[in-house]
Amino acid sequence: MISRREFVGGTAVSMAMMPTVGLASTNQEPVAAVNGAVFNRRPLADQPFAPLPLGAVRAKGWLATQLETMAQGLTGQLDEYYSLVGPRNAWLGGDGDAWERGPYWLDGLVPLAHILDDKRLKDKAQPWIEFALRSQQVSGYFGPPDDRGSGKDENGIQRANSADWWPRMVMLKVLQQHHEATRDQRVLDFMSRYFAYQQRQLPAQPLDHWTKWARHRGGENTASALWLYNRTGEPSLLELARTLVSQTSDWTAGFAAEQPPTAHGVNVAMGVKQPALAYLLDGRSEHIEAIRHGLMFLERDHGQVTGMFSGDEPLHGTNPIQGTELCTVVEFMFSLEILGQITGDVTVLDRLERIAYNALSAQTTDDYMARQYFQQPNQVMISRDVEQYAQQHGGTSQLVGLLDGYPCCTVNMHQGWPKFVHSMWAASADGGLAVLSYGPSSARATIGGVEVEAEQQTSYPFSDEIRIVLRMERPTSFPLHLRIPGWAEGATLKVNGQHELPASSGQIVRLERLWRTGDTVEVIFPAKIRRSTWHKQLTSLERGPLVFALPVGEEWRKIGERSGIDTSEIFPTTPWNYALEPDADVTLARSETVSDCPWIGANAPLSLSTTGRKIPGWDRYHQTHGSLPFSPVATEAPAETLRLIPYGCTLLRMSEFPIAKV
Ligand SMILES: [Zn+2]
């Protein structure tokens, strides 16, 4: 995380691989063995996991502190710092901003409010929800009227295209989350009327009638139509979903051919989920194959050690000085959360954790009051004088501030952590619970009529052990699914301290038994230190889901201010131009305790020590590191001990290194 000040800051056990197809309902009713979770109705394809209702998953430990920091930071008060989402916003009935910004903020504020059960945040979100519901016209149309673009041009306010399908796609996601948390029946009726309107209008006003964004991002709209179909069973929604798929850019063909319909990084991150939605409709495996191929292609041609692909803003190759936009980080995570539930694919879920615990934690300030528009894996300076991005935004793309680069991330970033926390647990189609991502958190569900609470007691990803404690009113039998990451070779499970069981890495294991209150399942991952290879044979050090980086000393220089929030450049105060010794030992050190604010450099709970050598003459060029020396690189410089900390704890850093020739 970006640091700007020092902080001190639990019978018989059966195991099986997850079946590729979950137990399906045989009629039109969704499976409801886990109350509140809604699975697919026929004829939609089956999926192994479905989300629990919003609010059923809670953050604990350091993750709770992370969410509370957001509530006290920009997520909980963005309207007070950014006037475009203030009272004049057209999504509150005002004469101001009428496009995506208001809905974007709500898409993070609403899940945060319900996960924290925070009345202040709920009260802040409610007027937006009431306006959206109240604004619906007899036709079914809702939101700001379609004349907002006329005649007024005012510094940066987005009023044009106020009738665009795209911002409505975001507001539909907001309303779905509101319904899942509150059961507000108005939402279902409202969405039914809107989708009937959409089906009537789309032939004459297709998704790209106003902007191209809606065409590339039509997967969001399709997901909302399927969400409502699973709740109402209204057959015309399937027809609408097919219309939406036909009008959305063809991401299946694009990924299969390694030619995405657009190279815009945020669109690509959102497009990754679209073939999976087409698969739910037609059951054709080519869609899932296309996603696998697309993820492979993105990693091969644009991949960086954080688990992200570059996009500044278009896809921009594997060089670790190319940038990744914060919107791309949070949208890719949301796509992977949906993909993980549809496919049960462990590689997808491993990728999700890698992004959350590296890229996401690195791109916002410790107090969640500022952010970077672009981050670099090798970020040796933060400056106005950058040259290497495809979109420079007047040199502001990399600065730490409120709105620098482009404002979208300031409103869209809020969905990252809350949706990730919510996706850590899921209902399984065979009537049980699943742990899809690890971290301190708990889940409540009614399973077969019995109230069950399950908690992950852990400081993961800073510890290798997760203790899952179950509590329930009376003994009950259900399956518990546990993801074993691909990197976790030699993982073991213990139930109530006994029955030590091996668990194969890269699979989801299923434990089914009669559970009693107080039962514990211990999951133990023998995380090993790994070297991975990236752009031009650059090497990174990893352990479990964490990437490690050499922190570079920081000198912050304020160059401006907006709403009292500094805009800063950051200069390096310590050397960064190192090559790693090829065969040097790498040793792990742990702090005695894990801080509630673990992403602050001074609090880093883990570190790796190894040996490196400086590369004389490798200097900065246009305020980033200069052209990369080919690896291995000859150097006569003396060997030095380097201490690397988790990537998410750093701002200026090196995470992809050349190798020294010795
Ligand atoms: Zn953005």
Image (cartoon, rainbow, N blue to C red):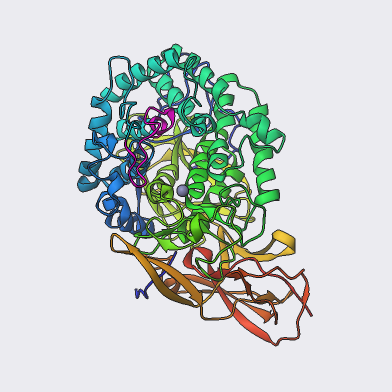
Magenta stretch, main secondary structure class: loop
Residue 185 visible in rendering: no
Residue 425 relative to residue 315: left or right: left
Q: Position of residue 651 (x, y in %)?
A: 49, 67
Q: Position of residue 405 (x, y in %)?
A: 46, 55
Residue 632 relative to residue 521: left or right: right
Q: Residue at x 56, y 49 (%)?
A: 313
Q: Is residue 607 above or below residue 271?
A: below
Give the quarter of the image for residue 237. top left
Residue 72 visible in rendering: yes
Q: Is residue 631 above or below residue 268?
A: below
In the picture as drawn, the residue positioned furthest to the front comes out as: 151
Q: Residue at x 62, y 28 (%)?
A: 250
Nearer-the-camera pick, 618 or 301: 618
Q: Residue at x 48, y 15 (%)?
A: 204
Quarter containing the N terminus:
bottom left
Q: Is residue 649 magenta?
A: no
Residue 103 relative to residue 622: left or right: left
Nearer-the-camera pick, 174 or 139: 139
Nearer-the-camera pick, 51 or 72: 72
Q: Position of residue 618 (x, y in %)?
A: 68, 76
Q: Is residue 435 above or below residue 588?
A: above
Give the quarter of the image for residue 101. top left
What count of labels does the image hold?
A: 0
Write down the region rendered in magenta.
152-170
Q: Residue at x 47, y 67 (%)?
A: 649
Residue 61 relative to residue 540: left or right: left
